[in-house]
Image (cartoon, rainbow, N blue to C red):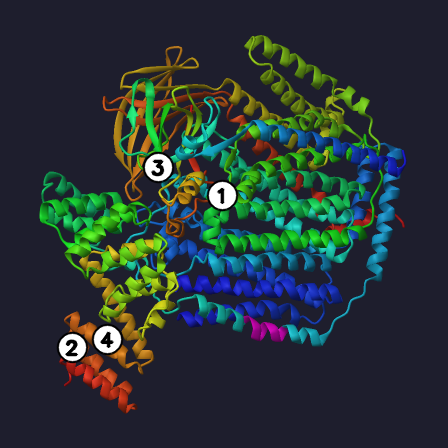
Amino acid sequence: MIAEAGHYALVLALALALIQSTVPMIGARLRDPVLMNVARSTALAQLLFVGLSFGALVLLHVLSDFSVANVYENSHSLKPLIYKITGVWGNHEGSMLLWVSILALFGGLVAMFGNNLPLSLRANALGVQGWVSTAFYLFILLTSNPFLRLANPPLEGRDLNPVLQDPGLAVHPPMLYLGYVGFSISFSFAIAALIEGRIDAAWARWVRPWTLMAWMFLTLGIAMGSYWAYYELGWGGWWFWDPVENASLMPWLAGTALLHSAVVMEKRNALKVWTVLLAILTFSLSLLGTFLVRSGVLTSVHAFATDPTRGVFILLILCVFIGGSLSLYAWRASSLKQGGLFAPISREGALVLNNLLLTTACATVFIGTLYPLGLEVLTGERISVGAPFFNLTFAPLFLPLLLALPFGPLLAWKRGDLIGAAQRLYAAGIVALVSVAVLWAWVRGGSAFAPLAIGLALFVILGALTDIAERSMLFRMPLSISLRRARGLPRASWGTMFAHVGVGVALIGIVCETTWNTELISTLKPGDVAKVAGYELKLDNISQRQGPNFGEMLAHFTVSEDGKVIGTMTPSKRSFTTRAMSTTEAALMSRGVSQLYISLGDTAASGAIAVRIYHKPMVLLIWFGPVLMAFGGLLSLSDRRLRVGAPKPAKAARGLQPAE
Amino acid sequence: MTRKQRRLTMIGGALVVLGIAVALVLNALRDSIVFFSTPQMVAEKHIPAGKRFRLGGLVEPGSLKRGDHMMVTFKIADGSNALSVAYKGILPDLFREGQGVVAEGSLDGAGVFKADTVLAKHDETYMPKDVADALKKQGHWKDDYEKAGKKPDTGAKPMQGASR
Amino acid sequence: MSLWFLLALMTVGAIFAVLWPLSRRTAVKREGRESAVYQDQLAEIDRDIAGGLIGETEGAAARVEISRRLLAAADAEEGSTVSSSLRLRRAVAMIALIGVPVLAGALYLHLGSPALPDFPLASRTRAPAAGQSLDQLVAQVQSHLETNPTDGRGWGVLAPVLGRLGRFEDAAQAFRNAIRYDGDSAARRAGLGEALAGAANGVVTAEAKAEFERAVALDADEPKARYFLGVAAEQDGRPKEAAALWQDMLSKAPADAPWRPVLETALKRVGATAQTAPDSAASTKMPALSNDTIASVQGMSEGDRGAMIRGMVDRLAARLKQNGSDVEGWLRLARAYMVLKEPDNARAARDDARRALAANEADLRKLNEGLKALGIDG
């Protein structure tokens, strides 16, 4: 009954989505507030039913109801409870259900908290949201239905892929989806604006919190996925330029650009057409990511061609939405009014440069990801575009972006003073240059790249701090006044600072890890000692352990520095009997923001065991940076200005309203 | 500046950036792309020693030998030809004889493939895409597999690898 | 609470969600306005000037700019008219009242399987030796076999279970041991072949095919081996051959053979229409089984297979209770009960059948003839 109720709830959600995608839009066209308001209740009801449906699937997994094919294929009665739950979205059908649930969640949020929106904009945006939902409900129900039943329930399930049995995966896909799907709101707003044929500064302010929220989740999701790969895959890599990763990076780049261009639009009523295009592109890239990951086209172009139902369906969704929205854009964009003027050297100009570089970088990732697919479809020749390609294209584009980054916030709107900004960045620049020189001297003869890159990162960080210092007139006024001023700064300014500092911090981590990472691969017998980067690691013994659904071989290491014991590390290898496969569980030890990393290889006949030991300096900064960025996003999101326009604050603001 | 001049400045700037990007992409595509071959293609094409490429196929059962200092040698076969591969380091968890594998590296003078990266398939229902396609072309592969096989999931890196 | 009641309740909820806003006579006036945003921007400039974040002159210029936007927005809001059409409202309400249940019901009946009961772990009575998982049992048997590796019968019992658990490589080894120590049989050869195919992700490799051929050589009617030889033919790109083989099996198969639905699904896959047995419509309505499932069903141990037959019989009985005009179905049910050595149930089925078919002379005669053959025409 649970399964059937969940199934029916999903069908009902589809029915509601169909109503949501038509009635409110008709209402908006006829300016009928009653019909427009249907959007709100249907969006909320849709959320309720998808929530029920998702809850039902979770319950089925928890209860190990193997009469449901999806549970049988992806679960096992012995699996720990937490992995029974994460197993829900560890497979195709379940993760698509999560996808639509999040889509409905965002729709519901707009319905609930969108009181500050004009009725017609909300109706149209929710209507567009309804189209997207409808398409994906159909996709799930017709091609990837998680509620299909087995007439003869087997006794035991087929387990979850052991590599996916990891707490990191419990949160990573939902985060990523919150990001991916969150951009659907910007998309819906953009399409709604195009339909209404009217777009202005207020629109940007309304879209901004939704974009920010999606961007934050996507940032965290990408960082988490990277950390997961780092410790779970057992070879210390944290970014592979793998198509799955690129699929999430592309919407992030476009979304970052969107965030910045929306600022220009909000403040200066300029870049309107471009911002709408970016909103469309960002969500299109999210859809593309879903297509790449979900259609199986990455596994094999051929598989896609021979079992096309799913792939073709998503491709169809992709074509309809991307093609449709871009056509609408081409048709309506010219009717949007032109915005304000600005000089090339100005805050607007800096943000345009930011957009230009970000979208170009995004385009290179796009080419690197899709070129092999395209080439194979066209010529049958198979190539792989790996890290070297991205290092050669992506990095050179990010360099000027980072160099220009500190200048942006210091330039005034309309007409900026580049020399003035540079003067204010003197201190930051000098510190950065000095640290380059010091580092270079310190590493002696090594490549000049790493010190330069770290100098650049420092410049970014200090530049971001300079902006706040300037605004609060630090060192130019008594400290108490500066502090008061700093407190009075809009939260968005602090958000900008944290996000920009996060970029610099992540860059330091990346450069240090790639340049000074030490690696030792060797075979050790109990009692042997390995020396890595000043640490001594002694293999004490090897033991066996039985886990809930796996057997585990643990190696116990004692780590000492300068003869002093500082801790133990126990990497392990698990073998899962139901899948006849094994996973490597790396052991990590953090020393400040650096880490020691041990993963195990095969056991030799002599009883010796192959180990891989890494010392990764500053590696934690790679993920600390994105966390800072997301925190900055959160700060901006809490800025009270973003909530303005809601009926209540508007009444309060009336007192401040100047005579017209 | 007039509106027109400003716009021209903008468009000019954009074109410059795009031009640089195109140059970068073309340059990178020339230099850093790695082609994929099967042992049979290697036998037919005479790939010069030292040229990097990816070699994919099945690990020939019984060919895996472990030497000193973590040296391993094995053969990658595709049904018609087989090529010896030498690799130093830890093989990925999922490396098994008879299973699909992709190695990246180059041929040495003696015709042995010196690999510096070995990627094994992700789980028992996943094959590296290149291997699957190549085997399929040669008829060692059945479409039925793919219908039964599930695709790897989000977040899951489709390959598990080992690299020196 | 029955399922249908729950579904109806949910439908009512969904309809209500659409009707509720329609029922509100006066539209809510709580609407966000562009002008509010611009007013706030003006206030913000005042604050910035007060805080010294922006110069007086720039502030004044910005204020002019925003005021211009504010005026335009206020004009637009003034000009917007509100209309409301009762007719349209009624139409939407009708769509909600009729469209939602019809669409949802039709789609659900097409996709769902409302008749299937839940099968959660807790209520699973068929699980062997309650409290002990299959894995633990397998481990026990395995450790027994490690000390007595020549116990061919033990291997013979373990092998299909391993196959069902998806441990195909172990299963293949167990089958080989069973054959070595306990003698060859068609079923074991077929099981070995299936395990090999399972290990190759469902591809019938040359090795597996050889085992199936051996099995058929031992027993020309071994169903599993023949089925997989068909799969092999299909995978080799000869679907016609596969279809012919399966058709042949199907025509010879007893009506209650548990692998009938498997064959029908397979035939459907290769595009041939199975010579529809009376109940094939019902069996094809079940969600399609994945190849894996089929493989695991085929690898069932005797006990499991019995359980599966049991399940099919129960379903058949349930279906006949709803629609009793199917003579063939009744006969199959009675025959199945006889096979299961449950003559009482068979007789009960006979009586039910006679009652259900009382109106139809011809069918009743057919039924009685069939019952005579089964020896229960009392």
Q: What predominant SS class does the magenta segment belong to? A: helix
Quarter of the rendering containing residue C240: bottom left
In the displayed structure, A444 sits above or below C359; it is above
Q: Which residues are magenta?
A: C93-100
Picture mark count: 4
Checking the image for residue C332, the label placed there is: 4
**C360 lies left or right of A142:** left
Tell me the chain of label 3: B
Are discs 4 and 3 less than 8 Å apart at CB? no
Q: Nearer the viewer, mark 4 or mark 3?
A: 3
**Quadrant into which the N terminus of chain C falls:** bottom left
Q: CB under 8 Å between callouts 4 and 1? A: no
Label 4 amino acid? Arg
Amino acid tagged 1: Leu
Residue under pointer 1: A298
In contact (CB < 8 Å): disc 1 and disc 2: no
Whether labels 4 and 3 share one chain: no
Residue behind mark 2? C344
Which element type, helix, strand or loop, lies under badge 1? Answer: loop
| Residue A131, image x, y percentages | 61, 59
The spot of residue B40 in percent (x, y) is 40, 34
Distance between mark 2 and mark 3 Cα atoms? 63 Å
- Label 4, label 3: how many angstroms apart (C-alpha)? 52 Å
Location of mark 3 (residue): B80
Q: Is residue C318 above or below residue A357?
A: below
